[in-house]
Every structure is written in C-alpha cells, then in structure tokens.
Image (cartoon, rainbow, N blue to C red):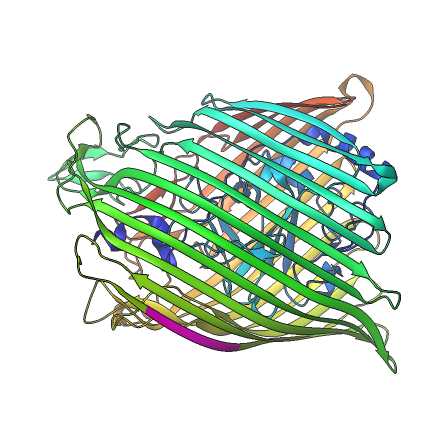
Amino acid sequence: MDRIRVTKWLLAGGTSIIALVQPFGALAQDAQERIQLETVVVEGQGGGTAGDAATGPVKGVVAKKTLTGSKTATDIKEIPQSVSVVGRQEIDDQGAQKVDEALRYTAGVFAQPFGPDSDTNWLFIRGFQATATGAYLDGLQLFSYGFGGFYVDSFGLERIEVLKGPASVLYGGSNPGGLVNYVSKRPDGRLRYLETGVNDAGNAYLGFDIGDIANEGVVSYRVNGRVAGGDTYSDLQYGWRGFVSPSITWKPDEQTSLTLLANYSHIDENHGGGSFLPYEGTVVDRVVDGVNYGRIPRDANYTETSVDLYKRQQGSLGYEFEHTFDNNWTVRSNARFGAAGIREVSVYPNGWISPTELDRINFGHDTDITTFLSDTRIEGKADTGPVEHTLLAGIDYKYYNIDQVQSSALYGTTPPIDAFNPIYGAPLTPRVSYLNEDLTQRQLGIYAQDQLRFADGWLVTLNGRYDRGWLSAHERPTFYAPDQDFVDKRSDGQWSGRAGLAYEFDSGITPYVSVATFFNPIIGTDANGALFEPEEGVQYEAGVKYTPTFIDGLFTLSVFDLTRRNVPVASPSNPFAQVQLGEVRSRGVELEGKVNVTEDFRLTAALTAYDLDITRDTDPTVIGKTPFIVPEVMASASVDYTFRGGWYDGISLGAGVRYIGSSWADNQNTLKVPAAALADVKIGYEKENWGVNLNVTNLFDKNYVASCQTALTCSYGEGRSFKLRVHTTW
C-alpha cells in the first residue's frame, strides 16, 4: 500500500522533476532590450534580431519563431501543431516565480494541479501529465522517474515553449500530450542586472544577471543566479535554495560558434502542507455522526520537523556547437551531462482514522541520478523544380541512470495527528526499505524532416524517425524481500512519423492539418514481472493560425483527437500490480491569442475545452469516464499597460483572470472538485534604470482545491500572495 500511495510524485509511472523558480524584474525589460539591441549576438539557432530569433528574447508577448516545433528556426505559424511561447516579458508581467506559475495563462496547459508545490513544476498538457517525460532544457530531455529529476530555476530562462501534442518524431519518447522546452539565457552583449524581492510570508531573494563581450566580439559571457530563503505560506515550512549558471560563447567567425553552459543548484528545506489531504475536509466539510468539523486549514502542515528534510545537490555541463559551410548547409550539435543527489524525508497524511485524526505515512528516499544527452543534426536547403525544401537529418542519444532506495515505516505504525488541533513530537517508528533498485535507460534515435514550400503558399512538413531503446533494472534486497537480487533487461525498436499540410494566405491566415504517431518508454514492471512496453498512439490535429498584418499578434485555433495506448492500469488479479491494458482518449479545442497593441500595451487570452475519456481499463466501471485531476474546461485573459507622459510616466498596471473548470476526484466520477475563478493584479513603476513591482496572486483569496487524485489525496490551490521586487541595471 505504501508503494502505491507513497506520494503524488509517483503519478503516471513515476516522476519528480524539480524545477523551482523565482520572480524577475519586469520593469527592467525595456532597459534590457535597449542593451540587447545595441549589440545583438546571434547564436546561430534561429538568427534574426531580438524578438524574432528562435532562442532569443521575445518582444512583448508575441514570439515569431521557435526551434521546439521543428528543430529548425521556423515561424510558429508554419508548424503543423499548436505552439505557445512565454517569454521573459510575459513571465515578468505575471510576477511568476515558478515555471508552472508562468504557464497558468497558456491554452492546453493545466498548471499547479497540486497547488504551490515548492519543489516541482507540475504540468498537464492536453490532459496528460508532462512533468516526468515532457520537460526539456534547450532541446534535451529532463527525464524523471520516481524522485530522480532535475531542478531548473526560471531566473535562468529566456523563454518557455510549449509544443502541444506528440513530439516523438523529433525528440524520441516523450509525453504524448506535449512537451515544455526551457530555453536558457545565453551570452548576448553587455548586461548588468540586479534584483531583490520578498513575499508576504517572509521569503526573500537576491538575483543577478551579468554579461559582457571581449576580444572584439569573439568571446562573450553571461553569469546569472539567485539565492532565496525564509518562511513560506505553509506552517512549519522554511529553507533556502540557490543556483549559479555561467555560460560562454566563442564565435571566431560568422559561420562558427560554440557555447558552453553550466549550472550548479542547491536546495535545503523542509516540506509544506496543503496536499495529501482527504476529499472530506477539503472539498466538502468533514461530517461524522451529525457533527460538522468543517475543513482542514489551507496552511496546515502535518509533517514532523524533527525528521523532515529535502536536500538536493545538482550540476550540469553542456555545449551547443554550430558551423555553416560555404554551401549554406549547417551542422549543429548539442550535448549535456548532468548529475543530482536528492535526499528526502516526509511525514504526510493518508486519510482519516477517527473523526478528527489523520493517519500518516513516514516516508523517505535516497536518490542519485546521472544523465547524458546529445543531438547532432545537419540542416540545409534544396530546390526540386518549383518546390523549396528545408531538409533536416539527425541522430540523438539519451542515457539515464537512477540509483534509488525508498522506505517507509511499517503500515499503521506512524502516529496519527489531529487535523484541527495538531500536536507534534510523537515518537516515530523506523522506516524500512520497500524499493532498492538501479535502473538504466538508453535510447538512440535517427530522424529526418522535410519542410516543403511550393505554389505561393503551400506548406508540407514530413517527419520520420526510428528509435531503439534499452532498459535494464537491477532489483536489490529490501526489508520485504531480503533475498531479492536479479537483473531484468528489455530492448524495443519503434517508428514514429508526422505529416502536416498548411496554406499561408497573404492576409496572415494559415490553416493546417496534421497526423502524428508517438511512443513513450515506461520504466517499471507489470503484474508478471516483465518490463513495460512503451506507450504508443496517434494524434489528428487541425487548426488555423493568424498573424494580422495590421497589428503585432498571433492567434491560434486548434482541434485534436489524441489516443494513448498501453497505459498501465491496475491488475484484476493483483491490486498492487499493473498491466498494460489501458487506453485514454483526449479530444478538444484550444484557442489562444497574444497581442502587442503597442510596446506598452499587451493582451493575452486562452480557452481550453476537452473531452477526456478512459476507453479501455481492467475496471469496467471507469470505461467512458473522465480521468481524475484534469479539468475539461479552462479559460484566462490578461492585460498589462504602461502609462507614458506626465507625472505618471512609467507606472504600469496589469490584471488577469483565470477560470479552472471542475474536475473529478476519482475515475468512477462520483466525487467532483468544483470550478474556481481567480483574479491576479500587478502595479509597477519604472524610472530610468530601476523599477519596482508588486504582484498579487488570487486577489480575493479564493479558497479552492486545485485537484484530487482519489478521495485520499487532494491539494489546495494557492491562496492570496503578495510578491514585491525591486531591480536595477547599470
């Protein structure tokens, strides 16, 4: 039972990508852009000027190009799938301090399903959890299994890109609902930026971003980082964290560049509350024998601080190389090595055992991971009669190893706690191991792409890819299986493909259709002890993208039908094991609009409507039902305006509204989680080279539950929070 429920991080096959982020200086953006426009360093992956480059700064809220959707610097409107880009300006306007906060206004993305989780960015795309296999950094996967993931602080990011729908044709196995690609800040001329801030809970931070050029532009560098610490909004939660991320670019000529990117991150904190709570007592009142005990306080924390800990040390080192030959064919190569050690102990609720007392689980793990990823590709253009081709061919490799031991106290031996009058300090029984394993996953992929343009507007995209994967699992002795010691291996090959057709009208309207197949390797074993086969399926998508000629904007309408097969579900003969008989279908419509009305006036809007269905399962009572956690309807809108002229010059006002539709707490669809409407506001002021911002999230302090996964595990959404930040450039 402990292994099944040990934590929400084991959802959907296991995950724990740690990606904690912090606020940035919104009002310094204009000053930063002026610096960048004076000296533009083109990194080769997209070219163009700031605002148009595929990896560089986004002008306002409207991005023009992306690498994520095709691995070539392509206009977003030409990619035959829906793509959303959130740039530095939009992150700053929202006052977002985490990646999942920055994506709360993005169509197709359900962010923060477990509330303001301090050590993970939880994201669902098109109904499917993307945290474990759908997170990427600079085009290379941040794979996560169990608690073995990586932490990415968004202070080090230039933009966040969301490719919706399958991406196996470009990236190998990944989340079928879509992926999120974090794009790092890179050397880009002279930069001097300093920022500090604090929230109303008393958590303060200091961030810096320094860059320059040397040797007549041949060498440029950038170093950014931050340190943060203090209390948070949950009782008993405190700690500190920090990171530093240096990068350097060597560009001996216009045809060659090499960028080195490094990162070191450290976290030392304890856990917060607000999650792992029962349906009765959060969504509805706790009522027993006619006595109404009300609801569990939103900021309550039921851990034991004497043992609770979360410690992470992490480092990575990578490169990006590019060379363009005289015939205009370009070779690009990027690679990254990463390693992390995570130690964690948490005591968390596990349902009611009396009218007011919560059962608890005393859980811990020691996890070490190492990864190596590389991607080498060649790109060029060719003509065959009237048809223009942009050709891409490449090979990539993924290596992921996790050495983990998970443990918990014997079931039922951890002392309970009163939910409404908690008393801490009861003696805890020792934890014993139930999982002790060393897992290695390797994947080698070969892919090709042809982007064809012909007949004054027709666009065709064709992709093909073959992957071979190798998985080995060494299961070692545990408390429950002291004689266990065996190795299991599996090898699979998989083809995937994508075909897209679009037509670009002179008016800026581009309708498109596409079909894509996908696969997603799963680490784990079924009820018979055999390693899982990869999940697989297909998506059909149609839509329209519109870039008006009279205003700087991008509008996207997409409809899709996505089927995911080989989903692990409960074994009918063993409730503690799984078999791959599940199938889930996601169909829906997404609308998104982003407009820079002027340089000082920005608008965004999004609407998501899904039909999520379980179409195959070993439990006949859930077939035709909607999976828990994900709402089927979401909507948002935001505005940000900066005044110019007179005494009010530099004052900015922003506001946003978010609607999170109702969801289900169980796959039988008997327990509903109500919808919630939330409001966010911002007021700021910028003067010359400094500025100050105050962001208020959940302005009216709406008390709501973000989601539940069964009646035992519900999570409160973020309450009202104030975030003040001050920044300067020089």
Is 490 one of the magenta-colored residues? yes
Nearest the eye: 43 or 24: 43
Q: Is residue 33 above or below residue 557?
A: above
Q: Residue at x 81, y 33 (%)?
A: 35
Q: In this view, does 68 lie above or below 446?
A: above
The N terminus lies in quadrant: bottom left
* Magenta segment boundaries in residue numbering: 488-494
Decide if residue 372 is in sight here: yes
Decide if residue 673 is in sight here: no
Q: In this view, does 494 lie above or below 323?
A: below
Nearest the eye: 184 or 335: 335
Nearest the eye: 140 or 684: 140
Horizontal side of 660 relative to 707 (left or right) equals: right
Residue 268: where, in percent of width, then height?
42, 31
Q: How many labels does the image show?
A: 0
Q: Which residue is drawn at 22% across and 57% down?
A: 477
Q: Main secondary structure of the magenta part?
A: strand
Residue 131: where, in percent of width, then height?
47, 53
Horizontal side of 397 relative to 50 (left or right) equals: left
The C terminus lies in quadrant: top right
Is 258 one of the magenta-colored residues? no
Instruction: Pick out the residue farthest to the left.
Output: 289
> Where is residue 154, by image quadrant?
top right
Q: Residue at x 71, y 33 (%)?
A: 641
Instruction: Pick out the residue farthest to the top.
Output: 647
Residue 378: where, in percent of width, then height?
74, 68
Q: Is residue 342 above or below residue 179?
A: above
Residue 449: where, in percent of width, then height?
69, 73
Instruction: Pick out the residue farthest to the bottom.
Output: 385
